Image: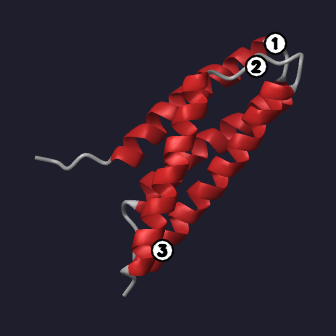
Amino acid sequence: MKKRNEVLELSFEFALQIINYSELLEERRKYVIARQLLKAGTSIGANIREAQSCESKADFIHKLKISHKEAEETDYWLLLCEKAASYPNPTIEMKTMLLSIQKLLTKIISTSRKYKS
């Protein structure tokens, strides 16, 4: 039986929501933010997935740190959308999922550093 990877699963589901939200932004002709958000929001999970086949513990931590930075950037774009009057608000679910991903990444990075060989 394969062990469940919560951060990998959550980041994949989040990426699907980011795709949908980016398409909504494009429908409203908000192309620049839509593209930035799409790139950052989907990169989170891509880097987490890449970390699954890392070459070393240091490489694993590095990939997850990149994911964490992408999550911070995604949070910035979502906050801009939330505060800009002419943009559709991101869903509470998206914001909650992103926060969960950020917390998981922080915990995994911290734990991995502790047991770094």
Q: Is residue 56 left or right of residue 15?
A: left
CB-based contact (under 8 Å), mark 2 and mark 1: yes
Q: Quadrant of residue 10?
A: top left
Q: Is residue 102 left or right of residue 69?
A: left
Task: Of the two numbered discs 3 and 1 on the same chain, state the one appearing first in sequence.
Answer: 1
Q: Is residue 75 above or below residue 106?
A: above
Q: Quadrant of residue 34?
A: top right
Q: Amino acid at mark 1?
A: Arg
Q: Amino acid at mark 3?
A: Asp
| Residue 114 on image: x %, y % | 41, 79
Secondary element at image label 1 = loop
Q: Which residue is mark 2?
A: 25
Task: Of the two numbered discs 3 and 2 on the same chain, state the one appearing first in sequence.
Answer: 2
Q: Residues within 10 Å of mark 1 (few under 14, many from 20)?
A: few
| Residue 102 on image: x %, y % | 55, 50
Q: Residue at x 67, y 44 (%)?
A: 40
Specify the quadrant that holds the C terminus: bottom left
Q: Which residue is mark 1?
A: 28
CB-based contact (under 8 Å), mark 3 and mark 1: no
Q: Which residue is mark 3?
A: 59
Name the residue at the left extreme.
1
Q: Is residue 114 above or below residue 16?
A: below
Q: Is residue 69 above or below residue 61?
A: above
Q: Residues within 10 Å of mark 2 (few under 14, many from 20)?
A: many
Q: Quadrant of residue 33?
A: top right
